[in-house]
Image (cartoon, grey):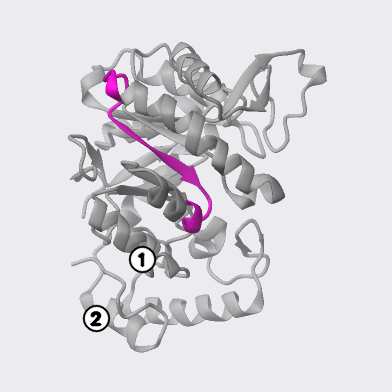
Amino acid sequence: MQPDTKLKFGRTDLEVTAFGFGTAPIGNIFREIDEETSDAMIQTAWDAGIRYFDTAPMYGHGLSELRTGQSLRWKNRDDFVLSSKVGRILKPAKRSEIDFAPWTNAAPFTSHFDYSYDGTMRAFEDSLQRMALERMDICFIHDIDVFTRGADQPKVFAEAMDGAWRALSSLKDQSMVKAIGVGVNEWEVCHAALQTHDFDCFLLAGRYTLLEQESLNDFLPLCEERGAAVVVGGGFNSGILATGAKEGAKYNYAPAPEDIMDRVRQTEQVCADHKVPLPAAALQFVVAHPAIPCFMAGTRTVAQLEQNLKWFSHEIPADFWAELKSKGLLREDAPVPA
C-alpha cells in the first residue's frame, strides 16, 4: 500500500490517506522545531499525496493548531481531511507563569480540562479560530483515559459521555463536523465509549502494534460491527519498533523492559532473514486491519518524514508475516498486509 492510498473512513462519507500527518511534534514536544521546519514537513507530506492531518489544542498549548492552519490555510479546503480535539480550554497568560512541560517554547496559553457541553462548544470554536479554517472534518474527545487522568478517570469519562458527547452530536447534526470520536491511549476506554454511544471513530495511541494486539479481543471486532473507524498513532510504541532493541530503547515512554527487548530481538531476526526493515513492518501492520484506515505519524524533520514514507511503501513478502505468526510473535488472528 502506498502512503497516499485513500481509504474509506468507517461508515462516514470521508476518505483519508493511509498515512496521516500527526502534528504533536510541531507543538514543540520535548524540544523546539522552528517555523521553517514545521512548514517544510507539512508541504513535503502534501507533495507526497498525504491528505489527512491531525492536531489538538494540547499540542504546544495551541501552537500546533496555529502552525497547521498556517501551512494548510491557502490550499483547497475540500482537498484534505482535518481533525482536532476537544476537552481543553486555552486561556492567555504570561509565559513566565506557564508550566509548558513537556512542551518547549509553546504558545502563551494555559491549558484547562473541560468536558462540559459549553466547554466543548467553546473549545471547538476556539480551534477553528486558531487554525483560521472554516471547518474540521473529524473531532475527537481527548484524553479521557487512565494514562492522563489517573484516579479521576471514571468521573471524567462520565462527564465526557454526557457534556462533550451532546455537544459534538449537536455539531454533527448541524453539519459542522462529519465524524465524532474519542482520542486516548487505551483501547479499553475506546471500547467503553463505543458501548456507551455510537461514535464514528477513535484515535488510539500505541495500543495496536506489532507488540500489542489485545484490542483484537473485543474493541476492534465491535468497531467492524458498528462501522467505526480507528486511526492508530504511536505505532512504534514510542520508540523501540523504530530503533530496535538497542540499549536505551523506549517502550511506552520508558526504558523497555527485558521481555519486550527479547521479543523485539526475535522480531528483528525475522526481519533480517526476509530483508524487511523493522519500522516498515510496524507501519504496514497497523493499516492491514479492516477497521483501521490510517496510521498517524509524527516526525521532527523532513528526513524523518521521508524515511517513514519509504518504510510505509517498502515491499514485504507474505512469508514474513507467516513466520512471525509461526514463532508466536504475532497473533494468529491478526490481519496482515496482502
Looking at the picture, tell me which residue is in the foreground, 129 or 74. 129
Question: Residue, x 67% and y 33% (percent of image)?
Answer: 103
For image coordinates 25% across by 57% down, the residue present is 224
Tell me residue 43's x, y (percent).
Answer: 35, 28
Residue identifier under label 2? 319
Res. 180 visible in picture: yes
Is residue 185 magenta-colored?
A: yes
Q: For the view shown, which residue lies furthest in the bottom direction?
A: 326
Identify which amino acid the numbered label 2 is placed on.
Asp
Q: Is residue 25 above or below residue 173?
A: below
Quarter of the view holding residue 280: bottom left
The question of residue 168 being in magenta is answered with no
Identify residue for label 1: 281
Q: Secondary structure at mark 1?
A: helix
In the rendered image, the vertical position of residue 264 relative to residue 238, given as above or below: below
Q: Please, what secondary structure does the residue beneath circle 2 have?
A: helix
Could you tell me how far apart the alpha carbons at marks 1 and 2 are, in whole angstroms?
13 Å
- What residue span does the magenta drawing correspond to? 173-189
Residue flagged by tag 1: what amino acid is it? Ala
